[in-house]
Image (tube, helix red, strand yellow):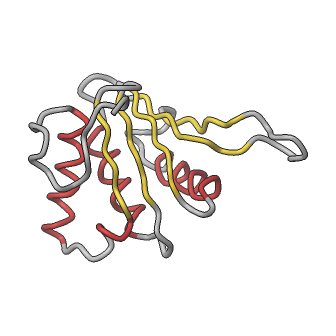
Amino acid sequence: MDVTITLLADEAGDELRSLHGWLTEEDALRGRVRLTAAPPGPGTMGAAAEALLVVLAPGGALAVLSGVLITWLRQRTSDVTLTALRDGDRAQVKLSAKRVRGLDGAGLQRQISEVEHLLRDELPEGESDAGSRRPVDE
């Protein structure tokens, strides 16, 4: 399973590099995370970070990925919105740093579990408030 992660933030490229560092520190994700970049624009020195691609083996580290995403978002001091898209078009989860920053331990566990289930496409649409699951073409 592939999960593509994009960010909506003022400094999205810097934030993607930060998240990349967090993800690659996890043993279960090491070697499975790649930073993708858009071609350099006119007058720029290099390519801008555009997304992260996480390649997970079947039965792999989806729970670890979900936990790192939530933990990383809680550490943001600015508002960051993260979108995780499974296999290019299957399931999409959108999370905001504002929504996870104040969660207690039980709330965090629920959030991590819901993200994992949404990316696995195990919950019926509308059953979770963790994020949103919708087809990309809507």
Left/right placement of residue 15 relative to residue 60 reads right
The single residue placed furthest to the right in the displayed view is 43
Instruction: Name the spot of residue 137 as percent of width and height, x first.
Output: 37, 29
Left/right placement of residue 134 relative to residue 21 reads left
Q: Residue at x 87, y 41 (%)?
A: 42
Residue 100 lies, with reference to residue 64, above or below; the image says below
Q: On the image, which quarter does residue 120 sit in?
A: top left
Quadrant location, the N terminus? top left
Residue 8 lies, with reference to residue 31, above or below; the image says below
Count of marks overlaid on the render = 0
The residue closer to the viewer here, 65 or 36, is 36
Instruction: Name the spot of residue 66 as percent of width and height, x first.
Output: 30, 48
Q: Residue at x 17, y 40 (%)?
A: 117
Q: Residue at x 63, y 61 (%)?
A: 11
Q: Residue at x 86, y 47 (%)?
A: 44
Quadrant location, the C terminus? top left
Q: On the image, which quarter does residue 95 sit in?
A: bottom left
Instruction: Name the spot of residue 74 as percent of width and height, x first.
Output: 37, 68
The residue closer to the viewer here, 59 or 133, is 133
